[in-house]
């Protein structure tokens, strides 16, 4: 197996519907400018609350991509 190098970044995706959609949005948005995405790991889930009601779901994701040589 060839040697490789990966960078890991942290992103926060948001959705007014679900944590899953928030995570998907974060990864798909990053995929528009980053190449060779490898692994996305959900680190934290939280919600934005206004006036006692949930108004947004937020998902913190660690995302790795491969450096090209």
Image (cartoon, rainbow, N blue to C red):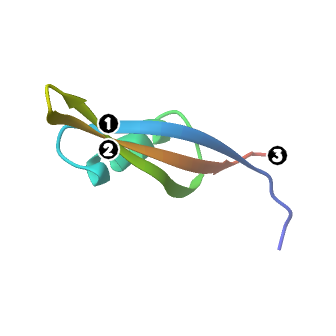
Q: Secondary structure at mark 3?
A: loop
Name the element at disc 2.
Answer: helix
Image mark for residue 69 = 3
Labels 3 and 2: the sequence-earlier one = 2
**Residue 27: % across, % down:** 44, 45
Q: Residue at x 32, y 36 (%)?
A: 14
Provide residue 61's location: percent of width, then percent of height. 49, 47
Q: CA distance from mark 1 to mark 2?
A: 4 Å
Q: Residues within 10 Å of mark 3 (few under 14, many from 20)?
A: few
Of residue 65 and residue 15, the one placed in the foreground of this image is: 15
At 50% from the left edge and 38% from the top edge, which residue is drawn? Answer: 11
Q: Contact (CB < 8 A) between labels 1 and 2?
A: yes
Q: As drawn, is 53 to the left or to the right of 11?
A: left
Which residue has dot 2 on it?
22
- Horizontal side of residue 54 vs 38, given as left or right: left
Residue bearing mark 1 = 14
């Amino acid at each position: 197996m060839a040697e490789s190098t990966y960078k890991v970044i942290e992103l926060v995706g948001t959705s007014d519907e679900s944590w899953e959609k928030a995570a998907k949005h974060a990864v798909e948005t990053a995929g528009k400018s980053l190449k060779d995405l490898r692994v996305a790991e959900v680190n934290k889930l939280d919600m934005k609350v206004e006036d006692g009601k949930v108004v947004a779901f937020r998902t913190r994701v660690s995302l790795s991509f491969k450096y090209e040589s």
